[in-house]
Amino acid sequence: MSDFEVEVRITPRPGLLDPQGNAVANALRSLDFPGIGEVSVGRLVRLRLRAQSADAAREQTDRMCRKLLANPVIEDFDILVRPDRPDRPDRPVGS
Amino acid sequence: MSDFEVEVRITPRPGLLDPQGNAVANALRSLDFPGIGEVSVGRLVRLRLRAQSADAAREQTDRMCRKLLANPVIEDFDILVRPDRPDRPDRPVGS
């Protein structure tokens, strides 16, 4: 078993209503920020996971997304798996 | 003026309480997902922005974060600016 650092990006599906994104866009415009176009607000879930392999970690995270973390009807998600480096938390592999 | 696609990753500062992350970790464990370590939940804000340059877009987004998008006392944020490619929404430059 190895430790992995998993990052899940959950974003509203394009073309669907994004009330939170619209609210943020309107708030930014009302604060006089110029040039604001479309805004979307999603979630960034990071977790440490012990699994047999990177593939197993990814497969398990995919099930977590479908069961709890995301709503696949209205959200897209993508999963990034890296080896965990607890001794260098600020410089994960691949970043 | 050019169009930019800006991505802001807002994450709980390490070492501070993250009640949402803890709730997600407990929920995953109660759903019998094994090997769950620390979980953190942040936000992913994406916006289209018209600005003079990539540096100007970054500087303006930094001000948006401090004023509205993030809470710098308890959250870290980082900003990624890319040229906007409306004709290729699925393949942003640099990804």
Image (spheres, coloured by chain):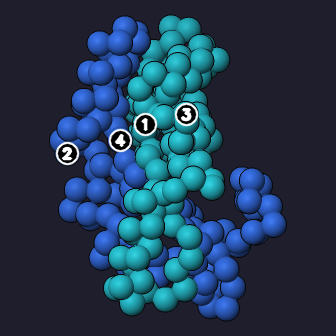
Chain colours: A blue, B cyan
Q: Is residue A52 left or right of residue B70?
A: right
Both marks 2 and 4 on one chain: yes
Residue drawn at 27 percent across, 64 percent down: A72
Which amino acid, mark 3?
Pro
What residue sits right under mark 2 in the picture? A16
Q: Is residue B6 above or below residue A41?
A: above
Dot placed on the residue nearer the N-terminal end, 1 or 3: 1
Q: Nearer the viewer, residue B1 or B10?
A: B10
Point out which mark residue B46 bears.
Answer: 1
Task: Say whether residue A55 is visible.
Answer: no
Task: Say whether residue A30 is visible.
Answer: yes
Residue drawn at 22 percent across, 56 percent down: A74
Query: Which label sits in the foreground, 2 or 3?
Result: 3
Query: For the N terminus of chain A, which image quadrant?
Result: bottom right
Which amino acid, mark 4?
Val
Which amino acid, mark 2?
Leu
Dot placed on the residue nearer the N-terminal end, 2 or 4: 2
**Element under label 1?**
strand
Percent x, y of residue B81: 58, 30
What residue sits right under mark 4 in the picture? A41
Q: Are marks 3 and 4 in contact (CB under 8 Å)?
A: no
